[in-house]
Image (spheres, rainbow, N blue to C red):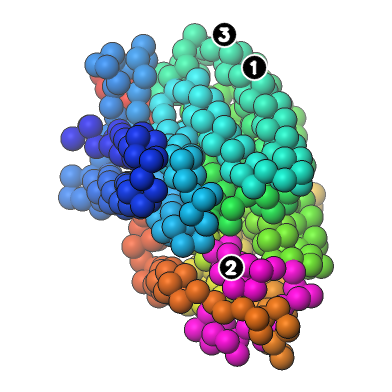
Amino acid sequence: MNLLAVAPLLVVLLTGTAALLVRAWPRVQQAVSVLGTLSYAGTVGVLGWQVVFAADASALAYQVGGWPAPFGITVVADALAAFVLAMTAIVAVYAVVFSVRFIDDRNQRVYYHPTFQFLLLGATGAVLTGDLFNLFVWFEVMLMSSYVFVAFYGNAQHTAAAVRYVVLNIIGGVFMLLGVGGLYAVTGTLNMADMARILAAPGAVTAPVVGLSALVFVTFALKAGLVPFQFWVPSAYRAAPLPVVAVFAGATKKVGIYAIIRLYFTVFGNADLSPTVPGVPGDSPIAFLAPTLIVMGVASILVGGLAAVNRDSLEELFAYSSIAQIGFIAIPVGIAAATTDPSLQHLGLLAALIFAFHHAVTKGLLFLSTGVIRDAVGTTHLSQLGGLAEDSPVFASIMLVGGLSLVGIPPLAGFFGKLFVFDAAARQFAAAGAGPGTSAGAAAILLVLLLGAVLTILYSTRAWMTTFWGSPSEAVMRGRVDRFEIAILTTLAVVVVLVGVGFEPLFQFADAAAAAALDTDGYVETVLGGEAS
């Protein structure tokens, strides 16, 4: 059964390799890529059922090569990993199917589909790995694949975006490698479960962990696109093919958030700092994360939201929107880090995970819808759009579903995402009532979340009204939407609706994932077994 933990990695690795081998037959390559991604999604579904919903549900660990932890390479699949893989799989399936129609045959040939699979491989490996060095390796796999896609179309603008992207990520990789090396020097291990066990032991040296983990955090925040590390997002999203952008926004950015949760809550969650630092709540390294992550989340909401309001193209608008929306994920994680109340910690992570899932499927729908518009009209500049609803009322309805979910209208997926984020912030405000300073800070967070929600309404309404309302522009009159692409997006819009209408399974999944993130002892037991004590 433990082999199931590594199955998603094996499926996507085999699919990428097979796509390379059949590169001389483009149609076969497309079929291999689509069927492989569907198989990946099926494997992730089975894994999620086994670790969360089955009667004998439990986390799984696979020791590669039979070498026991902490000496060998460990693959770990718990509820948190399965949850992140589930949202990745959903976005990946729609992106690869859409790619077959959207990307012209010449650009699909040879390397598009293998690179897509290796991007998926990097994200999957980063989520499933049980040691810090391999986390760095899988991040680099994502970087190399992402770089190819940012430079995909090869003109000067795309090349400049790719260079900017790769330079920033190389710098981030250097910080991560320094942090990982430092943590190894302090703890004597790279295995995350073993590191958690060592740091939780009485008398453990924990003070250096704060500074070293901050180096690693830089890479995670850069990958997530949090302010002030957001500079790569707009240019990369403009340059890469739109199906891949859907994966960037829906999956790879979430891997950065996953890594923050895994490292700070699961690995450092039971570590004690002695002595306690004045002004920092709690006595764990995660307490140092709280103010930084909250400030970055607040800045992301403001910078991304305000910039999105006046963008002229849909790619730019949704790119800046993604910066803002990642702030709605970072803030509840920061709230969870800022408290010692177990129930509020759980609620903060639950809110972040539910919002992340909503954002993955909703923003995937919106970026793929942008692809439909570009395919049909030849441009996504708002000044050249208008009246698309007249050509395709169905497409107008699909994008309306995405916009309403992004805003948070019930009963769509986005409603529950925002509901839980505001609930976590309100409970933090209620818990902070004893101190005027902390109360003011909690109130400021609530106000920023409210402002972010208003900004979301403004730019989502502008995007839909400008694109679909009014008389058709000349560009719109010359174009016709692709019916096959519309059929694909119709099913994704149904997913967005069903996630909201049938919210209970998603809640159970996210609830189990949040509990797994906080269950350091359970993670250690899964990986180390009898060595956990």
What is the CA distance from the residue labelled 3 to the residue labelled 2?
53 Å
Q: Residue at 43% of width from left, 72% of height from top?
A: 484
The one nearer the camera, 132 or 156, is 156
Q: CA distance from mark 3 to mark 1?
A: 11 Å
Tell me the quarter of the picture where residue 481 sits: bottom right
Residue 209, relative to residue 366: is it above or below? above
The residue at which mark 3 appears reads as 185
Q: Can residue 174 be seen at all in this image of the molecule?
A: yes
Q: Which residues are drawn in magenta?
A: 367-396
Q: Nearer the viewer, residue 506 or 368?
A: 368
User: Which mark sits nearer the N-terminus, 3 or 2?
Assistant: 3
Q: Which mark is residue 391?
A: none
Front of the two marks 1 and 2: 2
User: Which residue does the image show at 36% across and 66% down from the upper left?
Assistant: 504
Residue type (three-letter) at the residue carrying disc 3: Ala
Say whether residue 116 is magenta: no
Q: Residues within 10 Å of mark 1 (few under 14, many from 20)?
A: some
Where is mark 2, residue-wise? 375
Position of 356 with respect to 11 (left or right) is right
Quadrant of the image containing the C terminus: top left
**Residue matched to label 1:** 178
Disc nearer the start of the sequence (1/2): 1
Note whether residue 366 is visible: no
Within 10 angstroms of label 3, few (less than 14), some, or many (20 or more) residues? few
Residue 414: where, in percent of width, then height?
Answer: 54, 68
> Does the residue at mark 3 contact the one at mark 1 (Cβ under 8 Å)?
no
Q: Report the amino acid beneath label 2.
A: Asp
